[in-house]
Image: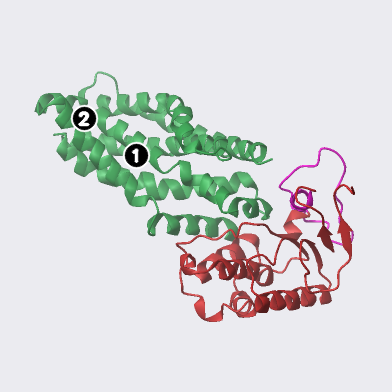
Amino acid sequence: MTALSALLLRDTRLAVRVGGGALMGVLFFLIVVTLVPFAVGPDLVQLRRIGPAILWLGALLASLLTLDRLLAADHEDGSLDLILMGGTPLELAVLAKAVAHWLTTCLPLVIATPLLGLLLNLEPLAVAAVALTLLAGTPALTCIGLIGAALSVALRRGGLLLPVLVLPLTVPVLIFGVAASNAAVAGPMSFGAPFLILCALSLGSLVLGPFAAAAALRHGLE
Amino acid sequence: MALIGPNGSGKSSLLRLIAGQLRPSEGLIELHGGDAERSIPEQAHYQGHLDALKPSLTVAENLGFWARYLGGGTAGSDEALAAVGLGGLSDLPAAYLSAGQRRRLSLARLIAIPRPIWLLDEPTSALDAAAQERLAELMRRHLGSGGMILAATHGPLGIDANELRLGLTA
């Protein structure tokens, strides 16, 4: 446990220091969401209708932003070689890195959601629904992204490949995240069903992600 | 044991094989007299060409992380930094270190975390004469306490070592 908490603490520290990506994600989220009203026009009714989808898309793109450094930075400076040599299973080590990524990149997005919901003329109930679905759905984004990061770690300019690999896999998360948010506001479906599927996607990828990522890393580093 | 051979003769690959970063296509790597409960990579330090340091963390944070992650705790960190001559710099971000200082900080890991096998790939690169002498002293102490060192090198290590020559003899 010492090893894992040390890794978690180090990655969190790196993210919030100069050159880390913690603030970048939130700023990117803010910019994407702010751009939408400029693109679709200031129709308040329309903004309210598409608001949850915009917030989800923005969060999805923002969570991708720092993923390419998640493992590649450690690979480039040799840390990954030493991480392999610790007594900790690689699966747990990459899970610790994913948790650090979620805490520093995705959690700030959830916290920023109420403010950005205001920009899109969302009602408090809709804002709460989007924040809740983001809280439940972003772990899936991080863990799916972790697999992509592990697959592209040994490639030069793998950062360009990463979104292409990861985004198609995030489609189910996006569908059920937006569906649950919309259901909470407009109906006619219940909020529960899509939300539970979203939770299931997160839990499933939380289990599958570290194993797939560790396997990809072991294979890719040789 | 000093590994000697021309570029591309497989010195680094051999070290990486022992460190568990490459898998042998055939054959076995065995350690006699080690801890049977732990794998060879868990009993070894690997010092490659890269220093495995994060520029935005301080010297002490960098070393402290590896001490906690690789096991052993941070108790020996201060002595390790003093042993490589970085004693007064522990609060400085690693970004401000020179290449030689980065290498010395990286080598401090070997002192801070006791592991019996040292796998060193060109350990003297970027080190000045005084630091090379200090490294030789640290290696002598490690050998004296029953440790094992396998180093790939082109120059003299400064200690008495058996030589293993790799590569084609023309």
For residue B81, say whether it is visible: yes
Q: How many marks?
A: 2
Which residue is drawn at the image coordinates 31% and 27% (left, top)? A178
Looking at the picture, which amino acid does disc 2 mark? Answer: Gly
Check if residue B31 falls in the magenta segment: yes
Q: Residues within 10 Å of mark 1 (few under 14, many from 20)?
A: many
User: Whole-percent x and y of residue A158?
Assistant: 51, 36
A44 to the left or right of A173: left
For residue B35, say whether it is visible: no
Colour given to chain A in the rendered image: green
> Pointer 2 indicates a residue of which chain?
A
Q: Which residues are magenta?
A: B10-39
User: Whole-percent x and y of residue A46?
Assistant: 14, 24
Check if residue A29 falls in the magenta segment: no
User: Whole-percent x and y of residue A96?
Assistant: 53, 49
Q: Which residue is mark 1?
A: A62
Location of residue A181 (image quadrant): top left
B82 to the left or right of A191: right
SS under mark 2: helix
Looking at the picture, which amino acid does disc 1 mark? Answer: Ala
Q: Earlier in the sequence, mark 2 or mark 1?
A: 2
Q: Which residue is mark 2?
A: A51
Chain letter for red?
A: B
Location of residue B114 (image quadrant): bottom right
SS under mark 1: helix
